[in-house]
């Protein structure tokens, strides 16, 4: 299982962890994030917490169709949900989403859980 994360620059670590909790993905140790967030301070915080980060390039995100459609994500990344697209891209071609993305309470972060193998 791999969780995808999308977040605004002003998000805090609590926002990301809340989104992971709401997506039932807190136990996922591999997190996929947009490559453009590699220098963000939250990336270093996630690594310090023991998460393995997988960086997904914008072109890969734009190539993935997602069930959730956010106008902001479409405009910035070319995909409907950054969290869903990151999770699916990192999990591989046979991956599927456990559920649509979940937003943190402050709406600054989103998380989605992707599973690999046969769909349910």
Image (tube, rainbow, N blue to C red):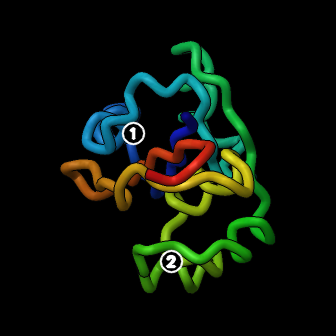
Front residue of 92/11: it is 92
Q: CA distance from mark 1 to mark 2?
A: 19 Å
Looking at the image, is 106 positioned above or below residue 12? Answer: below
Looking at the image, is 92 positioned above or below residue 21? Answer: below
Secondary element under disc 1, as helix, strand or loop, is helix
Sequence-first tag of 1 and 2:
1
Q: Which residue is label 2 attached to?
A: 80
Point out the frontmost of discs 1 and 2: 2
Q: Which mark is residue 73?
A: none
**Residue 78 placement, left or right of 36:** left
Q: Residue at x 22, y 52 (%)?
A: 106
Q: Residue at x 40, y 49 (%)?
A: 98
Looking at the image, is 91 positioned above or below residue 78? Answer: above
Relative image position of residue 72 (x, y in whole percent): 47, 80
Q: Is residue 45 visible?
A: no
Relative image position of residue 14 (x, y in whole percent): 32, 33
Q: Which residue is label 1 attached to?
A: 16
Secondary element under disc 2, as helix, strand or loop, is loop
Relative image position of residue 56 (x, y in whole percent): 74, 53
Q: Which quadrant would residue 70 be assigned to in this image? A: bottom left
Looking at the image, the residue that sits furthest to the left is 105
Looking at the image, is 65 positioned above or below residue 113? Answer: below
Q: Which quadrant would residue 38 be assigned to in this image? A: top right
Q: Residue at x 66, y 24 (%)?
A: 52
Quadrant containing the N terminus in the rendered view: top right
**Residue 52 placement, left or right of 111:** right
């Amino acid at each position: 299982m791999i969780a995808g994360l999308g977040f605004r620059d002003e998000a805090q670590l609590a926002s990301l962890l809340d989104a992971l909790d709401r997506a039932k993905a807190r136990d996922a140790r591999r997190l996929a994030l947009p490559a453009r967030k590699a220098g963000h301070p939250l990336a270093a915080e996630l690594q310090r917490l023991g998460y393995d980060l997988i960086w997904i390039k914008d072109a890969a995100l734009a190539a993935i169709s997602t069930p959730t459609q956010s106008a902001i994500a479409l405009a910035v990344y070319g995909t409907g949900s950054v969290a869903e697209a990151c999770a699916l891209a990192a999990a591989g071609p046979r991956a599927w989403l456990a559920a649509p993305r979940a937003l943190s309470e402050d709406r600054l972060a989103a998380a989605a859980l992707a599973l690999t193998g046969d769909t349910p």
